[in-house]
Image (spheres, helix red, strand yellow):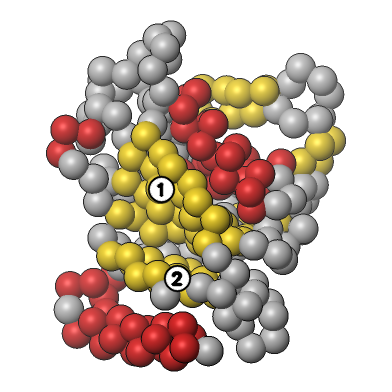
Amino acid sequence: MKNLKIFVIFLISFITLLSSGNLCSACTIIAVGKKASADGSVIISHTDCGADCRIRVVPSQNYKKGMLANIYWGIQDVNLPLDDNGTVLGTMPQAMRTYSYFHSAYSHMNEHQLAIAESTTSQREEMKIDMAVCKQIMTVEQAQIFALQRCKTSRDAAMLIGSLMSEYGFLPSCVGESETLVIGDTEEIWVIEIFSVGSDWDPEGSEPGAVWVAQRIPDDHALVVTTKVWLLV
């Protein structure tokens, strides 16, 4: 209960900050563990600045063994037709069965109540990349889609997203900065932070295509993330 009261105080402070300063257009995540919520529910929510705020349901599908899934740039482009995800940057092995999910600029929930919230965060200048020359192809919004299509738990989703970033290279799609995702299922919450590794990364080399770390949020904690800011209580 003490942690919850602290969280409420911080939340009020955040709302004041967001309404009065330069963070009024920031992406914001609020998450509450099951021992910090009133009814024992895991709560995940976010507001995002992705241009495409249209929401549609992508149904589950079956695929033949050996098929490939496209990796897109342009998922957030509101000017594209609803079923057009933009330019294909590459491919990866397709799952034989995918789950139904809600698709938007940052797709956020699937049929198994796996939910993902997103906020862009900052990173050091030397870690940023030049899209004109880099070989990284995995945006965070694309990784979210793959996780929602393939995973039932937040733990599995965090590990999958991390592995995709390592293998295909993290390509920032929001002002060249890093990303924080908070991932929840009906039992637990995980947070994953992802940083890029500069423009010289080679997918044929031995180095991972991103710097990332994932950690479980304790059940009796609440979390707020907004652009460039973290609060954990």
Q: Is residue 106 left or right of residue 95?
A: left
Give the tally of numbered discs.
2
* Residue type at numbered disc 2: Leu
Q: Position of residue 76 (x, y in %)?
A: 44, 50
Compared to 19, does 74 lie above or below?
above
Say which residue appears at 17% left-offset and 73% top-offset: 22
Say which residue appears at 51% left-offset and 37% top-offset: 162
Task: For residue 210, say whether it is visible.
Answer: yes
Task: For residue 149, say whether it is visible.
Answer: no
Q: Nearer the viewer, residue 173 or 46?
A: 46
SS at mark 1 in the image: strand
Compared to 73, does 113 lie above or below?
below
Label 1 neighbour load within 10 Å: few <14, some 14-19, many 20+: some
* Residue type at numbered disc 1: Glu
* Residue picked out by circle 2: 223
Does the CB distance between marks 1 and 2 fall below 8 Å?
A: no
Q: Nearer the viewer, residue 218 or 170?
A: 218
* Residue picked out by circle 1: 193
Label 2 neighbour load within 10 Å: few <14, some 14-19, many 20+: many
Say which residue appears at 64% left-offset and 62% top-offset: 188
Say which residue appears at 49% left-offset and 74% top-offset: 222
